[in-house]
Amino acid sequence: MRCFVFLIIFLSVGSVLAQESVVRTGADILAESEFDRIAGHTVGLIVNHTALVGDEHLINLVHDSPEVTLGAIFGPEHGLRGTAEDGEAVQDGVDRLTGAPVYSLYGKTRRPTPEMLSNLDLLVFDIQDVGARFYTFISTMGLAMQSAAEAGIPFVVLDRPNPLSGTYASGFVLEPEVQSFVGQFSIPIAHGLTVGELATMIKGEALLPGLDILELEIIPMQNWTRNMQWPDTGRPWVPTSPNIPQFETALVYPGTCFFEATSGSEGRGTRNPFLQVGAVGVNGSEIAAVLNRKSLPGVVFEGVEFTPEPLTSMDSAPKLNGQVIQGLGIKVTDRRTYQPVEVGIHIFHAYYHAVPAADEFLTRREWLARLSGTTELAGMLKSMTPEEIIASWQEELTNFIQRSEHYYLYE
């Protein structure tokens, strides 16, 4: 009997400790407080399917709260439910469960208009990001911050983890001349910040104009530390968009996304987007052998065969549709030492020098500049080694990290 009682106590204590170690998001904290920060207000929620509190969606919790009025819902790229394909325009509508108007921020406009905000007291942002500059959710956040400032209403960010951790930052810092919706701010490809930290830096460093008057509030997480990657948070992965179905995809994405600017495949049209890439006329097994000799940390490469094909809610018209590709597979062996942007440069460089015609491979040079953040990468691929390309951004990256440290909310 004593052993049985001890076992119950042990299991109970273990359960409490496990719960205490799970990262609690800003949305968790706000909901637990019965929405005290936004009580008495008519609010607009900038959310998608990732805005969960346990098994409940933030929209439903706010709608059901007697303390808050849900005035409007705003959806980013991929829509409110996260099912629209990459680049697909999303239409306005009405949420059938709450009756609230739903405004698309990836359709006729990329930011809330004065008319959309006319009856709102404040805006609340709660979307899970992946930690890469060209993932458009942070652009949506920044532009919505500008709209809130112009409307004279507060902007509240419910913070969520950076899946890549708060210690990894890498890549070119965006050059102003290539600013676009996939690069709104002068930050590196992997920025190493949570969305809450990034929001404070966008305002504090004037990375967008007109934010000096914005009333910005961050509701921080609990139990998150800078060295945590997503598997350390204790939270289940919710696919952030159709082609980021798992954490491993988010981990490699900042490097293999460069293939979007080529005639090759970034793995769309398969169940392993970004974890495998390829190009016509290039043997992936040979590329794998070249890269494995480099002994890059945390990764091994292998030749894989895949055939892009239309996949519902992922890609209805993938590049190289129906063609059998002898491609390259990326197997992360140590997520903590893996460097996605650096690995991406090594892969991209190897393919650039292996394709039959480099000019026919780099089919979207302007898009490459927008993704990489510089107009120089195409020329660098031709004349520099991967190590030299990586070294070229170190000074500006160090400067960014030193500035960003002032906005850290977590140790």
Image (cartoon, rainbow, N blue to C red):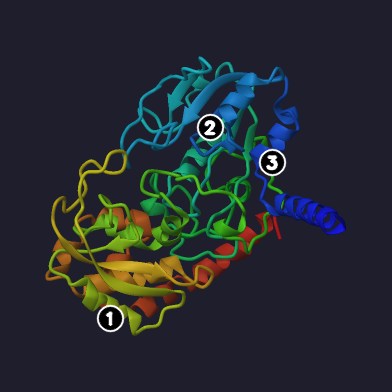
Amino acid type of the residue tagged 3 in the rendering: Ile
Q: Position of residue 231 (x, y in %)?
A: 56, 58
Amino acid type of the residue tagged 1 in the rendering: Ala
Foreground: 252 or 97? Answer: 97
Q: Position of residue 353 (x, y in %)?
A: 21, 75
Residue of label 2 = 46
- Give the residue drawn at x 58%, y 16%: 119
Q: Residues within 10 Å of mark 3 (few under 14, many from 20)?
A: some
Residue of label 1 = 289
Q: Position of residue 373 (x, y in %)?
A: 39, 58
Check residue 219 in the rendering and tell me which mark sits there, or answer none. 3
Q: Position of residue 165 (x, y in %)?
A: 57, 60
- Give the residue drawn at x 38%, y 79%: 388
- Give the residue drawn at x 44%, y 55%: 250
Secondary element type, mark 2: strand
- Circles 2 and 3 in contact, beta carbons < 8 Å: no
Quarter of the picture holding the C terminus: bottom right
Quarter of the picture holding the N terminus: bottom right
Foreground: 275 or 194? Answer: 275
Residue 267 visible from this viewpoint = yes
Amino acid type of the residue tagged 2 in the rendering: Ile
Quadrant in the rendering for residue 84: top left
Q: Earlier in the sequence, mark 2 or mark 3?
A: 2
Q: Earlier in the sequence, mark 1 or mark 2?
A: 2
Q: Earlier in the sequence, mark 3 or mark 1?
A: 3
Secondary element type, mark 3: strand
